[in-house]
Image: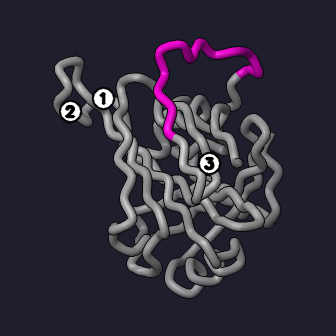
């Protein structure tokens, strides 16, 4: 269940979901899934076989602000091995050292309007769902996981689609912080 840590406005946009759907706490068959593990940045993630993972330490700055120490992008592949990216969303996990949730919130509130936050629980993780507006037409969302050493910021294409939320739930249920 979502527990809002900030009062919500009386006006709600019916086009956006009020919470990230929770998958039942059952075993998901992950026998064909791939695993990406990064000891230095303290996480292991299992992901669906229709993705390939591309880690990079040379990415552009997140929202033009700070460059992540590591960025892992999950991109859809075709059965023949070529990049397709048409059905499933691209997912990125940005890992930052020496950054706090308060830093991220401060940055967003200084630059964007209508920054809201909600606490959600997926598997063993308490996650902060951030939403902000760049304009009346564009709303962005990110999932943040705070760890004593790192902040993990997770973004996906088409964040508000049900398919994206289900895939993110499946992946986050199989995310381990080391």
Label 1 crowd (10 A; few <14 / some 14-19 / many >=20):
few
Q: Disc 2 marks which residue? A: 84
Image x and y of residue 131, in percent: 58, 61
Q: Quadrant of residue 86?
A: top left
Is residue 65 a member of the stretch shown in magenta?
Answer: no
* Front in this rendered view, residue 129 or 55: 55
Which secondary structure is most common in the magenta stretch?
A: loop
- Residue 43 shows which numbered tag? 3
Question: What is the distance, in whole Å, between disc 3 and disc 1 at their CAs?
Answer: 27 Å
Colouring used for the render: one colour
In the rendered image, the vertical position of residue 51 relative to residue 112, given as above or below? above
Q: Disc 1 marks which residue? A: 87
User: Magenta stretch?
Assistant: 24-36
Q: Residue furthest front?
A: 39
Q: Secondary structure at mark 1?
A: loop
Judged left or right of residue 8, residue 48 is: left
Q: Quadrant of residue 116?
A: bottom right
Label 2 crowd (10 A; few <14 / some 14-19 / many >=20):
few
């Amino acid at each position: 269940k979502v527990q809002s840590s900030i009062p919500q406005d009386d006006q709600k946009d019916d086009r956006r979901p009020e919470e990230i759907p929770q998958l039942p706490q059952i075993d998901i068959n992950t026998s064909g899934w791939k695993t990406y593990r990064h000891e230095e940045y303290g996480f292991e993630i299992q992901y669906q076989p229709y993705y390939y993972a591309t880690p990079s330490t040379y990415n552009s700055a997140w929202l033009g602000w700070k460059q992540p120490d590591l960025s892992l992008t999950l991109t859809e592949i075709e059965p023949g091995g070529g990049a397709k990216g048409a059905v499933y969303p691209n997912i990125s996990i940005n890992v930052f050292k020496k950054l706090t949730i308060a830093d991220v919130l401060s940055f967003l509130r200084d630059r964007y309007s209508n920054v809201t936050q909600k606490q959600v629980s997926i598997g063993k993780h308490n996650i902060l769902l951030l939403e902000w507006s760049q304009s009346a037409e564009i709303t962005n969302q990110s999932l943040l996981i705070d760890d004593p050493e790192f902040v993990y910021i997770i973004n996906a294409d088409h964040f508000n689609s049900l398919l994206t939320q289900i895939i993110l739930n499946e992946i986050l249920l199989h995310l381990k912080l080391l």
